[in-house]
Image (cartoon, rainbow, N blue to C red):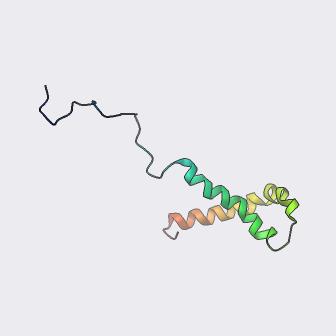
Amino acid sequence: MTHAGQQQAGVGQADHGEAPDPRGPVWRRLVPVVALALLAPWAAECSWGGFAGTDMLLVVVVLAPMYGGAAILIRETARRTGGG
């Protein structure tokens, strides 16, 4: 028997077994990373005319791991050290 104003354990409470992620949904964290990885080679090579717009697929496939990886590493270092 419960007193007025008290709820029984488990009544009216949803227990899904895990707490919500305090960082937010996964897609909100991945979209900026993917955008940075794809825009880094464009900013480095295509913006100044090193490659034509038709060669963008080649630039993304070949240069994205190099430029994108470095940009993501710099971003993560800045975020984890409190700089960004």
Query: Could you say where residue 49 lies in the image, as x and y percent from the top left?
Result: 85, 72
User: Based on the displayed image, in which of its 4 quarters is residue 64 positioned?
Assistant: bottom right
Q: Residue at x 43, y 44 (%)?
A: 20
Query: Could you say where residue 84 lies in the image, as x and y percent from the top left?
Result: 53, 69
Outermost residue, bottom side: 48
Which quadrant of the figure contains the N terminus?
Answer: top left
User: Based on the displayed image, in which of its 4 quarters is residue 36 positioned?
Assistant: bottom right
Q: Residue at x 63, y 57 (%)?
A: 33
Q: Residue at x 24, y 31 (%)?
A: 9
Query: Could you say where residue 24 lies in the image, as x and y percent from the top left?
Result: 48, 51
Q: Residue at x 17, y 35 (%)?
A: 6
Q: How many marks?
A: 0
Q: Is residue 13 left or right of residue 43?
A: left
User: Based on the displayed image, in which of its 4 quarters is residue 39 positioned?
Assistant: bottom right
Q: Is residue 64 left or right of residue 11?
A: right
Tell me: residue 83, above or below residue 11: below
Outermost residue, top side: 1
Tell me: residue 7, above or below residue 76: above
